[in-house]
Amino acid sequence: MTSKEVRQLFEQTGALLKGHFVLRSGRHSREYFQCALALQEMPTVERFGRALANQVRDLAATTVVAPAMGGLVIGQEIARQLGLRFVFVEKENEMLVLSRGFRLCADERVLITDDVITTGGSVQETTNIVEQASATPVGIAAIVDRSGGQVKFKYPLKTLLQLNVETFPPDDLPPDLRDTPAVKPGS
C-alpha cells in the first residue's frame, strides 16, 4: 500500500479534516486525521492492518499493545493479521495504565501500535508500561506519522503515511487560526 493510496483513503472516507483543531498534545493544527472515520469501514481496516502487519512481521512480536482509544481498532487488526494476542492500555487518572486484568510477561515480545503519531506521547507512555512489565518492545506501528519523522523512539517505527503537518503551541497561533474557533475532535 503506497502513501498516496493511504492519503486517498483518508480523503475518500472524510477522515482528513481541514480547519482549526486542538490535538491530544494540546498543540493546534490546520489538519486532523480522524482515523475513526476511516476505520469504521472494515475493508479499510483490513487493508491498513495487512499493510502494517507486512511491515512488522519480521519483528517476531508475540503480543500487540495499543493505547485506547485511537490505537484499538488498528492494533487489534494487526494482531488478527499476525495471529497474535492483543491487549490495550487506557487512561486512568489522566495516565495510561494496563488494566482489566491484562498482564505482560518477561518473555513477551511486544509490538506497540497507534493510529496517528504527532508528538509520540501515547506511544512513549505505552512503551514505558511495556518496559516496566519487563516485556520486550520490538517495534512501533502506526497508520500516520504527522511529525514528518521528527519523533524518535528507541524502537523501530513503521508507518503507512509520513507527513510533516504544521502544529502550533496554543500561545503562538498564526492569525488564521487565532480568528477561527478551535475544535477538539478526539482520537
Image (tube, rainbow, N blue to C red):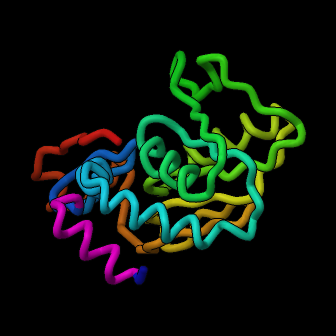
Instruction: Report the predominant secondary structure element of the magenta stretch.
Output: helix
- Which residue lies most toward the front here? 83
Q: Indicate left or right for 18 with 124 as reference.
A: left
39, 177: nearer the viewer: 39
- Give the residue drawn at x 62%, y 20%: 99
Residue 141, quarter of picture: bottom right
| Percent position of residue 72, x then y | 46, 41
Q: Is residue 11 magenta?
A: yes
| Residue 185 pos. (x, y %) | 24, 42
x and y percentages locating residue 61 in the rendered image? 74, 55
Residue 154 showing in the rendered view: no
In this rendering, the count of numbered labels is: 0
The magenta-colored residue range is 3-15
Q: Residue at x 71, y 66 (%)?
A: 156
Tell me which corner region of the image, top left, top right, bottom left or bottom right, holds residue 187.
Answer: top left
| Residue 74 x %, y % | 46, 51
